[in-house]
Image (spheres, rainbow, N blue to C red):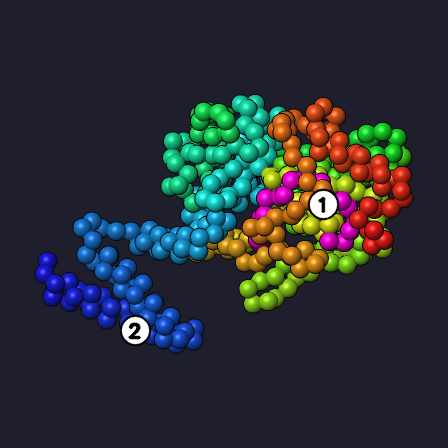
Amino acid sequence: MNKKIIIGIIIIALISSIGTIVGLCFALSFDSKTAGNLTRLIGAMRFIESQYVQEVDEDKLIAGAISGMVRSLGDPHSIYLEPRLYGQLKAETSGSFGGIGVYMGFKDGGVYVLGVIPDSPGEKVGLRAGDSILAVNSQPIEEIDPAEVAMKIRGEVGTNVELLIRRENEEDKTYTITREVIKVQTVAGKMLDDREGYIRISNFSENTGQEFKAKLNELEQQGMKGFILDLRQNPGGLITSCVEIAQEIVPAGTIVSVIKRDGEKEVYTSNLQQAKFPIVVLIDKNSASASELLSGALQDTKAALIVGQKSYGKGSVQTVIPMFQDDGLKLTIAKYYTPKGRSIDGTGIAPDVEVELETPLPVSRELATDYFDDVQLRTAEELLAKQLDSGKILFDDNG
């Protein structure tokens, strides 16, 4: 086909669409640049529909265009959800789902295991926090939108998924994992001695706030005077559950602010007049999102001492927007900020006392005593004991 014919086809395609474009731009008060870009988009679609060597599906073209727009943002947490993925997401949020029991994070183009649920399929085959996922069912991660990885790993109960895993100082290995119904108890705890308590939160789900309050009350009845809050390998979850817990232990004032691009701000606050217990919080490089919000609020208000390693650095807010063809759009719409206005996105929370852990934490460690060689926990116990002995938080306003 010669150049003149091609140009003619493009012109015809544009003319056939120009009435629609003009009407749409007028109705939505678009400027000339936006109108021009819409002309390009619709013109390209019409040219493909009329001239591609095979017949094309218009719905697929539109879906591809939306997916391409989202990918161009370079945000691993934003994704276009085609009908299958959108339906799967709705099913997961309505109750139990088929999965392997791992929490994942996305950083520097990679996908990492942030935590593994005890007694889950992931734990049974030996997955660990810190593992890097290289491929899902032989499809390299580079070919999958980061936010879609979790969708591909989850699926019908009883079916298998294959993950190619890279672990430091070991050869890459493929794991075949059978999906199961995943149900999670998110809070565990016990007394360490006659005055020090220990509470671990594995993630922030719908019932975590109530679980935490019940455990806090239980340990207080047992004589707890202060406690260690273990947020290591906690990938985050619902901000509402995080706030519910913060309102029990963060002094009156701001807990977290959610700020959109236009400056619109939503502030979550606490009415707690004063901290009831000395607290030491444990975090690591796999502590993310809501766990960072909680530790950041406790750190900024000097209600707790933070011990461990710098956290993951996931401080953005996503929402899911239904589209019109049983599909949806998961989009980052805001960022979280601590009481002092710090953004944790891409930076994380730096501990007050940095302690490295040479040996990885085991997955099945619902309680502190499940792990006998935990230098971070030992440090936290020592610091909590000093606070209890002195009667004040070590980093309070009095020095």
On the image, the x and y values in percent for residue 148 come to: 46, 43
Q: Which residue is mark 2?
A: 19
The local secondary structure at tag 2 comes to: helix
Q: Position of residue 48 (x, y in %)?
A: 24, 57
Q: Which residues are magenta?
A: 300-317
Callouts 2 and 1 close, C-beta under 8 Å:
no
Q: Nearer the viewer, residue 157 or 377?
A: 377
Nearer to the camera, 192 or 265:
192
Residue at image position (70%, 58%) is: 340
Which one is in front, 102 or 55?
102
Task: Based on the picture, tell me whether residue 19 belongs to the magenta stretch.
Answer: no
Rendered position, 305 above or below 97? below
Do we see residue 271 in this rendering?
yes
- Which image quadrant for residue 173? top left
Q: Is residue 302 magenta?
A: yes
- Residue 187 lies left or right of residue 12; in this view the side is right
Badge 2, how many Cα within 10 Å: few under 14, some, many 20+? few
Amino acid type for the residue under numbered disc 1 = Asp
Which residue lies under the disc numbered 1?
A: 352
Q: Quadrant of residue 387?
A: top right
In this view, which residue lies farthest toward the left? 2
Q: Which residue is at a point 52% across and 32% down the rendered structure image?
A: 131
